[in-house]
Image: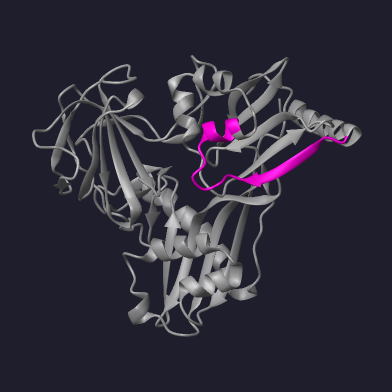
Amino acid sequence: MAIYMIRFFILFLFVTTLFSSKVEDFKWSEGETYLVFLEKHNLPQKPLYYNLDKDDQLLTQEMRAGINCQILRDTQKNITQILLPLNDELQIHIYQNKNSYSFEVIPIISTIKTEAFTLKINHSPYLDIINATGSKKLAEIFVSSFKYSLNFKRDLRKGDTLVMVYDQKYRLGKIFSMPTLKVAMIEMKKKRHYIYLNDDDRFYDEKGHEIEGFLLTRPVKNARISSRFTKRRFHPILKKWKAHLGVDYAARRGTPVVAAGSGRISFAGRLGAYGKIIKIRHNDGYETRYAHLKSFRKGIKRGKYVKKGHTIGYVGSTGRSTGPHLHFELRKGGRATNPLRIVQVTTKKLKGKAKKEFLKLKEDYDEVIAGHLENKTTFIKTPKQDKVCYFYNGGSRE
């Protein structure tokens, strides 16, 4: 399959050059909806929206301002294909199909590079990272990672050292999506402080103690996780790409659901495939969603302030659901993020086999950090190539 995709990409480049087809890059506009986009480009709304299933219609609402998109036109400037990234894993593919257009969701084609940098503190970690890399995203990730464990204002001094190693995705040769922090070190008062991303997608210090982040509690106590967060999943029954932008907790109907964090209820009612759902707004732009509920606790309504751990509803199977469970989402600025990376039930210590595996990972990362401290050079591994194909002939494919 990979060889086929590579050959197809080469064929695409050849055809594009031969017939002078043109690829246009553009950014998704602030406040623009998917339907407005279709209308603006004289694209048919019925096959490209109204004939879609509810899940795909919901996916079109994931478009965000500033995302780089592409349009391919033929020699008569007619649109033949469009790529609209939904997140860092999936994209909408609109393509000409006989006398009309078709819609499908396909994987994002990306290259991942592991990169790093070392710098001396001059002003603050946030400003110095931006000055060194030009990336506000890297600065925000670094500061938020140490936010709850270190006091930069009190303990940081000019000349202290900072090292950051992270994975960065590239799409069509350009930086794409948020970086993923792998390991970071900051020296304060001649003491080095580390943070490591473990294989369980949680951050730990050098002793294998979990780093406290945005503290939330598990919304259903002692429940089994039946489905995890993923931005790219090929549905085995529907035979198409879907995103699961939350975590499902399997539990008996009527099991209490508690607020994962303190905040104010912004919505409580029915909402399409979500069924009965409660949305809670928290500090720092976070929002949690609790879907498929059987019912709400008495007094739960929009505008009510609830505390972390307070019962807000009960597990059910309303909306598009195959059985009783809670679908739990965590969003920031409207974008879904993996709750398991941020939700901290308690600060735990790794033990036994898990700790042994972590210490091996830590040893590898420490060697990388030591190399940067010694050489003070940027570290870039050979990129990992995902599936290769930018535009297609049309039709579903893996």
Tell me: residue 176, above or below residue 187.
above
Residue 138 lies left or right of residue 274; in this view the side is right
Q: What's the magenta region?
A: 20-39
Q: Name, please, the residue furthest toward the left.
A: 298
Residue 389 lies left or right of residue 304; in this view the side is right
Residue shown at the point (25%, 47%) measured from the top left: 345
**Looking at this view, is 377 or 207 the one in front?**
377
Q: Is residue 188 magenta-colored?
A: no
Total numbered labels: 0
**Looking at this view, is 39 or 55 the one in front?**
39
Q: Is residue 21 magenta-colored?
A: yes
**Looking at this view, is 305 or 350 the one in front?**
305
Residue shown at the point (42%, 82%) measured from the top left: 190
**Dividing the image into 4 quarters, which one contains the C terminus?**
top right
Q: Position of residue 112 (x, y in %)?
A: 63, 48
**Dividing the image into 4 quarters, which one contains the N terminus?**
top right
Residue 78 lies left or right of residue 288; in this view the side is right
Q: Position of residue 353 (x, y in %)?
A: 38, 45
Residue 250's image quarter? top left
Residue shown at the point (63%, 20%) measured from the top left: 396
Q: Position of residue 56 (x, y in %)?
A: 49, 25
Tell me: residue 71, above or below residue 309.
above
Residue 117's image quarter? bottom right
Would residue 107 be seen by someone viewing this image from the given angle? no
Residue 117 lies left or right of residue 95; in this view the side is left
Q: Position of residue 271 (x, y in %)?
A: 31, 28
**Looking at this view, is 380 or 103 the one in front?**
103
